[in-house]
Every structure is written in C-alpha cells, then in structure tokens.
Amino acid sequence: MLTHDQIWVALDRLAARAGLSPSGLAKRAGLDPTTFNRSKRVTSDGRERWPSTESIAKALAAADSSIESFARLIDNDDTGDGRSVPMLDFALASASGAFDESGLPSGKGWTATALPATEDGHTFALEISGDAFAPVYRGGDIVLVSPGAPIRKGDRVVVRSKTGEVTIATLRRRAAKALELQPLDASQAVRTMAAGDVAWIARIVWTSQ
C-alpha cells in the first residue's frame, strides 16, 4: 500500500534528479509554484493532502520521466546518486530545539527530501522562504548543508549564533577569535562575529534552484 510520505518523497526525488527544487519542478510543469511545497502536504487541521494524478503527470512530463521510473522512485531503487536528507524551512531554523548542540537536526518540523549524496552523513537541507537572501537565493530554493565539509575563504556558509540567529553569508575570514562574514547582498557591510558567539558554522555544498 502506498503511503503519503512515499508519494511526496518520490516527487522530491524526481525534482532532485532534474536539478530542481519542488517549487522549481512545479513551475516547469506549468503548475502553481507552491503545488509541491511542504506547506501544501498537510492541511491546517492536520489531514494529509495528496498530489493529484494530473499534477504528477505534468511533473513527469516536465522532468522527461515515465510513470515506471516514478514507481521505482517510490520503491527507492532508482535514486541514482541521491538519498533522503532531513530538511527544514529556513524560517524555522532559528527556533529553539531545531538543532542540537553540535548543529545537527533535532526536534520537530523536519521532513525528508531527496538530494544528491555527499560523503558527510550529517548533511541536511534548508528550504529558503521569503526574499531575505535574494537575488542569490529565492523562496523555494533548497541549500544542502554539510557540517563535516571543510570550510575555506569564499565559501557560502550557514552560521548559527548562540542566541539562535541563523544566517547565510560568504566567509571572508576565519580566525581564532572572530569570523568575518559578507552578506549575500554585496551592498551590505561585512559583519564580524566573535568566535565565542558562534554556535556552529557549516558549508553550503549544493543548491537546487
């Protein structure tokens, strides 16, 4: 028997194979960009909402895929180099309990999505909401974050402060006592954070747009 989660994860895998976010796949299929968003998968009163057969058919056409390959995505034996990773809406990333002390996913609100595999088994994904990081990232884009990946000057990173603030920036400099971060909006001034104020920092290793 098919489950609600199996169908939605298969759609996530279909989007990932096409190099798209779920909203990107919906747009390519000629659907409303929010059709496959996580907020549409459960109603406000907690009832599961399933994708229509029409929307699945249009998604398959947009991804140049067949119903047979979609069935294999449901069975999880045709994912290629992808795998399921935990994903959270970026707007919820500052919430208490969203991450543990090591900067790994924790608590409620996380779902699963299929994205390219990495060597870091602790990889997680964040779905951008709003336009705070435009024009680099827009609502619906997904960033894959690897806590174990080495970080170098010029890398785009996710940083969480000990007060719970989470931001995305380009690393300008990392020293023993401080971080220098360039906001994605280049017109904004470089920000300096004392090392003691940083809960964790992790590199963005892939983006689906």
Image (cartoon, helix red, strand yellow):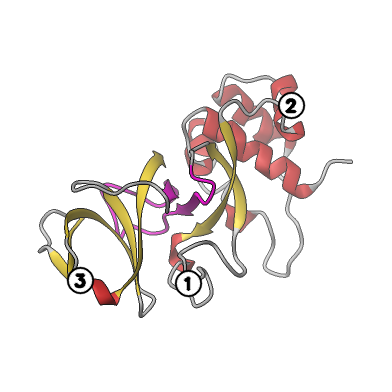
Tell me the magenta residue range.
Answer: 120-146
Per the image, the residue denoted by label 2 is 72
Residue at 32 percent of width and 48 percent of height: 137
Q: Which residue is mark 1?
A: 101
Along the line of sight, the residue nearer the viewer: 177 or 33: 177
* View extreme (front): residue: 176
x then y, percent, for residue 108: 62, 68
SS class, disc 1: loop
At x 15% / y 69%, what residue is drawn?
Answer: 192
The answer to whether residue 77 is above or below residue 128 is above
Question: Against 89, is 21 above or below?
Answer: above
The amino acid beneath tag 2 is: Arg
| Sooner in the amino-acid sequence: mark 3 or mark 2 | 2
Q: Quadrant of the C terminus?
A: top left
Which of the two marks, 3 or 2, is nearer to us in this view? 3
On the question of residue 15 being in view, the answer is yes
Q: Residue at x 67, y 68 (%)?
A: 44
Q: Position of residue 156 (x, y in %)?
A: 27, 49
Is residue 92 shown above or below 60?
Answer: below
Q: Is residue 124 left or right of residue 5?
A: left
Tell me which amino acid carries mark 3: Met
